[in-house]
Image (tube, rainbow, N blue to C red):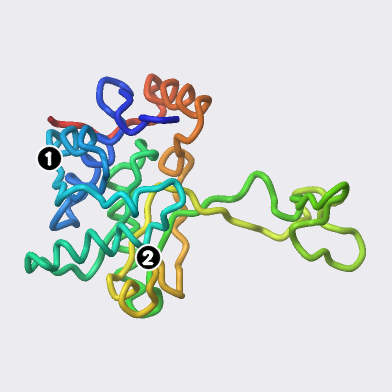
Amino acid sequence: MPGKNLRELAGHPLIAYSIAAAQTAGVFDAVVVSTDSEEIATVATSYGAEVPGLRPAEMAGSTSPDIEWVRHTIESLAAEGREFEVFSLLRPTSPFRGPETICSAFEALVELGDQADSIRAVQLCREHPGKMWVVEGNLMRPLLDQPDGVPYHSRQYQSLPTVHVQNSSIEVAWTRALREHDSIAGERVAPFFADDAAGFSIDYPDDWRRAEEMAASEDVSLPAVAR
């Protein structure tokens, strides 16, 4: 969905809800938006976020790894004398992730201390990897090695190993993960179990339709936005 970060949901551009949630969570010293778009930068600053320069083009491609722009942003802030022990990625595609979710994830990582390098949101997968295939020519093979006896792809979901999939709602990490592991997650990643609304991500047109339905319902709420 090109341009989705600026598309309006319930009266505000999508990115505004992640900015608002970060601002009201009360755990951050800075709320920073990394983008290569002048338009997104203008909107982000109008909602109170910082944009410390545009993201370099070589870090803004569809296949650019997150580690590049995260490190670039944190190093840009460090060059101004602003050092941070912890950073969090709050992607605009999860507008129903509120400040309470952010606080819970932050507190969970702090409580773990040195036991974890980071914590990230996960949920039970609906499409189990045990039933996934890799097509090779005219045939295909299971993505996962299969056990003896009845293979995963021929079993009921309830009998398969429990598998969680990450969603894009929140990641919180000690900044040392960047230095020590050259990674935004590090080597020891703890799970954060986000509920259905907080973990919901807008990636496809049908997701947007569902987001509009959710925003109009009384069952879930979007973060309060002040421009």
Q: Nearer the viewer, residue 83 or 68?
A: 68
Q: Nearer the viewer, residue 109 or 166?
A: 166
In the image, taking residue 185 as reference, residue 18 lies left or right, namely: left
Q: Nearer the viewer, residue 206 or 104?
A: 206
Q: Residue at x 28, y 36 (%)?
A: 15
The N terminus sits in image quarter: top left
Q: Judge the density around disc 1: few (<14), some (14-19), many (≥20) Cα neighbours within 10 Å.
A: some
- Which residue is denoted by mark 1 in the rendering? 48
- Which residue is denoted by mark 2 in the rendering? 184
Q: Position of residue 157 (x, y in %)?
A: 75, 49
In the image, taking residue 196 as reference, residue 70 lies left or right, namely: left
The C terminus sits in image quarter: top left
Residue found farthest to the front: 58
Q: Position of residue 198 (x, y in %)?
A: 41, 42
Q: Residue at x 37, y 65 (%)?
A: 184
In the image, taking residue 90 as reference, residue 137 lies left or right, namely: right
Q: Earlier in the sequence, mark 1 or mark 2?
A: 1
Q: Amino acid at mark 1?
A: Gly
In the image, taking residue 32 as reference, residue 132 lies left or right, namely: right
